[in-house]
Amino acid sequence: MVTDRQRQGEGGGQKARCGGRPTTIKSLATFVPPRILTNADLEKMVDTTDEWILQRTGIRERHIVEPGVATSDLGTAAALQAIANAGLTPDDIGVIVVGTVTPDMMFPSTACLIQHKIGAHHAWGFDLSAACSAFTYALTTASQFVATGAHEHALVVGADVMSSIIDYQDRATCVIFGDGAGAVVVSAATDPHDGRIIDFEHEIDGAGASALFMPAGGSLRPPSHETVDKRMHYVKQEGQAVFKFAVRKTEEIARRILERNGLQPSDLSLFVSHQANRRIILAAAEKLGLDESRFIINIERFGNTTAATIPLALNDAVTGGRLKKGDLVLLASVGAGFTAGAVLLRWGL
Ligand code: UT7
């Protein structure tokens, strides 16, 4: 028997983690709210400049919801399109996994709300909390249900309304985040020409919890006048600590999954990293020896949309002709927790 420790250990030659029948991403769709918040808009709200934001983060603009629009609304739009793109109907979906840190409310789950809104009458589902790694974790989780044969089609949604938990008086965080959603349908790979979810590698490190978190609103510090007065219902981040961890861990987890599969970074057609900061992606890509033809950065137009960055980047890669059927793709994410994830796949669309 191969233990988890052996799989993660040095030496290579370990087995890929994906068992059961092969699975694939059968479709992809994204949705962002139409309203745009530009760097010029932010200059009027906090002490910042377009130049600083662009240089330090690579972001020009981000999409922001109108009041009353929630994560389930963005997720529903992406989900309906993904299901249609797969040539399916909502009734074909067996399980829904929603990655988000901005659920519509503490409960019921956003998965329940999306299930009802799309009319997926045969689906069960749940939310998954992994911050910026939510899409890679949700993809892996959903894929297991298809691999075991428990379900034929699983819906994965990565959606966040970050503007609902961002302090627009804090220049260190408000310039970074945006709102958006992405969805994929995961199905059994029945044809050799189908794509393939090949392997995954995930880890968490709770020692990083205080580097990126929302202090109040949970069971530890329920909402009170004091928590509101102290602005504790907003994202707090030690930017530099997270930045350094993200660069190091992105490279480390990418190398680990590639080595386990006997691959080099140069074997990748495309490296699709979580989009938190242009400089993080450039640094990680440089450490991996990837030139710019092998990774995608689209943070300029969306900012950091947390659970939605990877599907948004995949979508831009497809529409820009950067991602084709048969390509070997590595998804990688690092986020609050800390969480880190990588999914290796053969693109099949
Ligand atoms: O997706 C989840 C994971 N999150 C991340 O991966 C984010 C990781 N961190 C980052 O992307 C970067 O650390 C930030 C973009 C958050 C900050 O960039 P930085 O280059 O690390 O800046 P810093 O925090 O070291 O701050 C440098 C200076 C400070 O001023 P002083 O103390 O040198 O006078 C900040 O107050 O930049 C100042 N600053 C700003 N200035 C203008 C911070 N935010 C701003 C701003 N406009 N918006």
Image (cartoon, rainbow, N blue to C red):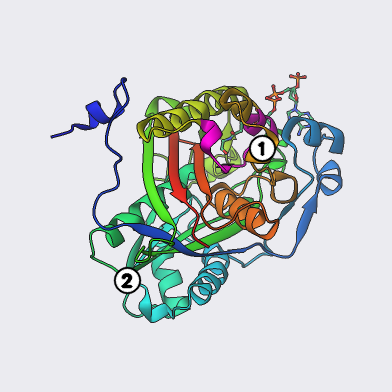
Residue 292, horizontal then vertical, whole percent: 69, 36
Q: Quadrant of the N terminus?
A: top left
Residue 312, horizontal then vertical, whole percent: 61, 54
Residue type indicated by callout 1: Thr
Taking the image as shown, residue 135 lies to the left or right of residue 29, namely left
- Give the mark toward the camera: 1 or 2: 2
Task: Looking at the picture, tell me which residue is in the foreground, 237 or 297.
Answer: 297
Residue type indicated by callout 2: Gly
Observer able to see residue 58:
yes
Q: Residue furthest front?
A: 192
Q: Which mark is residue 53?
A: none
Which residue corresponds to the image point at 37% horizontal and 34% vertical from the top-left? Answer: 203
Observer able to see residue 214:
no
The answer to whether 297 is drawn above or below residue 91 in the figure is above
Q: Which residues are magenta?
A: 265-282
Q: Which residue is mark 1?
A: 173
SS under mark 2: loop
Q: For residue 240, which quarter of the picture? A: top right
SS under mark 1: helix
Question: Cβ of disc 1 within 8 Å of ligand 1?
Answer: yes
Residue 286, horizontal then vertical, whole percent: 63, 25
Mark 1–mark 2 Cα distance, whole angstroms, equals 37 Å
Q: Which mark is residue 94?
A: 2
Which residue corresponds to the image point at 29% horizontal and 55% vertical from the top-left? Answer: 144
The answer to whether 19 is drawn above or below residue 5 in the figure is below
